[in-house]
Image (cartoon, rainbow, N blue to C red):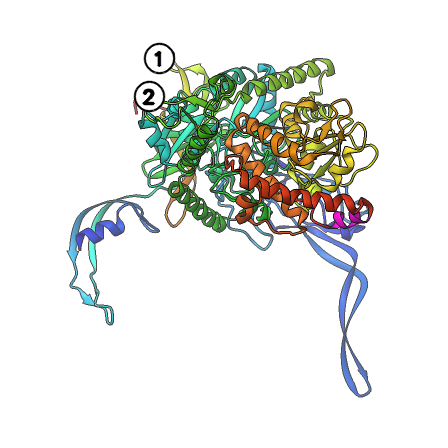
Amino acid sequence: MLRKLYEEVEGHIDGQYGYIISVLNIVEVGSGVLQPMTGLAEFNVVYQALVMKVFKNMVVDGVVTVVNPLGFWAEIGPLTMFVASALIPTYFKYDPSANPPAFISEFGDDNGHVSRIEKGVAVRARIIGIRTEATEIFCVGTIKEDYLGPQLGV
Amino acid sequence: METTQNLALPQDRYPITIVSLRVKKDSEIYRDEVIGVYEYVGTVVVKKTVVADGREIHEEVPTRRLVKEEWRSQFEGRIDKLNVSPGQTIADPKQILAVLVEPCGHPIQVRGICATCGKDLSIGDYMGNDMGRATINMAHDNRGVTVSRDVAEKLDKERSQRLLIAQKLTLILDLDQTVVHATVDPTVLQWMNDPQNPNQPFLKDVHKFEIPTYHTHYVKLRPGTREFLSAMNELYEMHIYTMGSRQYADQIAMILDPDRHLFKDRIISRDENRSNFKSIQRLFPSDQSMVVIVDDRSDIWRWSPNLYKILPFNFFVGTGDINAPRLPPSGPPRSGPVLPVSQLVAEPPDDDDEKSVEEKDLSDDVQHQFLDDLEKTRPLEKISEELEEEGDRNTDAMEVDTPAADSATDNVKPKTPTKELSPRRRTVLVDNDRELDRVTEILRNVHHTFYAEKAASGPAPPDVGEIMARQKKDVLRGVKIVFSGVIPSNLNPAQQDIWIGAEQFGAKCSVDLSDDVTHVVTVKQIGTNRTNKVRRARNMPGVFVVKPDWLYDSISRWERQEEEEYLLEEVCRGARLSLETGRAIYETGDDDEAILSGTWEHENDLFIKLGQDDIEAMDAEIEAALAEDDDSDEIDHDTQDTSFPDASQNTDADFDAFFEEGFAAFAEENESSDPPKEDEKRKAPEGER
């Protein structure tokens, strides 16, 4: 029965709580009630779980997955985020000849490296819009603000 | 992303008079807020009740009268300019009444939310929602980013600028049968592991990959592909556009371009395209002036002028294009055991433009089924077995044949000494395709012309499509073609691949013979069974009667080929072909002897020269020609083996019977003179492949 619970809820989306990432603790398993006609029993289970729910204006850390001229995609755990090129600071220029494609900053960072947004780079972004679908939550973000953008050592 | 919007009113209401205004300059308004009130002369339906003959009749009478209406804003934002004042009458529908500055024009949207302001746009009001403001999906991937026309144009422009600076053009490259040929036939693996197999040398560079829970694919690169890609990389920014699945495309890209420096992420597959057709607009919505396409099919590009149609690369014989099983084959007729030609021709061309998502699932099933069938039927093995049988027979027939006679051909390979019966064994696979070398040359030329013209024309850059169309037009300029026995009569000839292809290359096509015809393109015809047109054309001076290969080769090489090599040779030795005039000279005489002795030897040579593919194609064509003379619409595949003795089945009895038949028909046709029959002929089917 516990396995059934894990299968049913882990990795799924709840409209109220967002992503249910992992069931941590089962508080109470109610007594089963047989359903008429089917022979199945229904149990009310109270459990604690690790959930992830994002809110508008929340600042999140993610990893860039895809870069294209329109902007880039990042993953924040199970959540995917899109940052449009308009919301990337203008000193980041899209360079299609780079391999892999990247937004490259005109300024170096503190260590003198050119700051790049390319696949695999950690970024910090602020969420500006969220859309919850049946199987997926997805949001758009911005890095055109102070302290946002590619991060070192995240 | 502030966007300005010019406000106007519905065009059919002009002239209008502004009655009052409720906003001032710089006032912030919401979407659907009332800006003012205006009036216009409109048609209003008035319900009237008329009493006639003691009964009430309800009538709706349209009457014209002054109508007052509220002027509501479709957009949210700040009024930047207000060009009208109360009491003013405006007659010109084009006059801008007010200018409004939107805080965000939602030019980039991701699945219903604006990527620049984060607003959920899928929630609409009675005026609809704002999702329609960004509908163009121009990214290679399918993650749901859509942009507005303005942004698309901006991005296209930026790309063009970048390419101009780098002196490059864009090249869209197809995969299947253009640079690679893939199959799922497990025979390939057997052959690869069998050192005795004569096909093994060709299979050394066949790549194998598995798509999880799907099929194991075997992929052969077209000879010269790597050289082609690296040469093209200098001149072109390359994109992959394939009808294969995403996984398939990625796997092939890994083989072609392991470090991803050639294509990067510029790969688009069936999963992103969702249509049975390819279009440049999918990737380059506004500017196609620098795009060159290389593909083996022109129909799915709707004969785009930017297309360079390459001859299909058909390495694994009988497989065809594994990613296009639902469409009829392209290019020169090729036949295989999996896809009988008649079946494909009979299939109606797929006309539904945009495949919906549900349909796509269906087509995926079809695709899966096709691959399953392919795995089971193992066309390669079949062909190989057939060939071996033939080979055995052939060697029996020509025991004293010297190896020198065969050394000129590519198909024949010395066989390993395991089988004593046949000293050599023909291989199924042929690895002599040098098509890409020529493509490289042509694309270089296009690139060169483009930048030469750009330098000459100054600021306005030339259009590659125009350049290519012009170069194509020069190829067959002044040629007038009549097809005979090539296009099935039940199809509209002007919509056929070969017809459109010929016209794109500057030739004029016509249904019937006329004085200015220069070429008759026809399938191989035997004995007396040639079509009426061909018979008439033979008597017209200066008319070439050529095989379709002449046209296909001219088109794919961008060069008018010498007709001499493609002339339809007379099977009947009694009639000689004059090379000067291209017409046949008939010498009626003792034909029977000539055919029985002469024809066969000729055929035998041909068989060695040509691959199994060609032989099969010819068989199909001959059969079609036979069927045509019977005035029957259907192609009876069962008769194939009996109606014309296969080149390999060299039994005298067959030939005697066959040619006796042929001559009876010949005699008949000669007696009944042509004119009355011609009209009949025109109505009758013109020939099927």
Magenta segment: B676-683
The percent coordinates of residue B315 (x first, y second) are 47, 29
Q: CA distance from mark 2 to mark 1?
A: 10 Å
Give the quarter of the image for residue B535: top right
- Contact (Cβ within 8 Å) of mark 2 with mark 1: yes
Depth check: give the residue in front, B440 or B423: B423
Residue at 65% from the left image edge and 33% from the top image edge: B593
Identify which amino acid the numbered label 1 is placed on.
Answer: Asn
* Chain for numbered disc 2: A
Task: Provide the residue designation for mark 1.
Answer: A111
Tell me which residue sits at (57%, 50%) in the image: B636
Q: Which chain is home to disc 1? A: A
Query: A54 or B539: nearer the eye?
Result: B539
Q: Is residue B107 visible?
A: no
Q: Is residue B302 left or right of residue A21?
A: right
Identity, as a three-letter code, of the amino acid under mark 2: Leu
Q: Is residue B324 magenta?
A: no
- Looking at the picture, tell me which residue is in the foreground, B603 or B450: B603
Dot 1 falls on a residue whose secondary structure is loop
* Residue A1 sits in quarter: bottom left
From the image, which quarter does the C terminus of chain B lie in? top right
Q: Which residue is mark 2?
A: A152
Task: Classify B414 as above or below B126.
Answer: above
Q: Residue furthest bottom?
A: B54
SS label for mark 2 = loop
- Packing grade of label 2 (10 A; few <14, some 14-19, many >=20) is few
Q: Is residue B601 left or right of residue B55?
A: left
Q: Principal SS element in the magenta part?
A: helix
Q: Position of residue B179 (x, y in %)?
A: 50, 26
Looking at this view, is B82 or B647 the one in front? Answer: B647
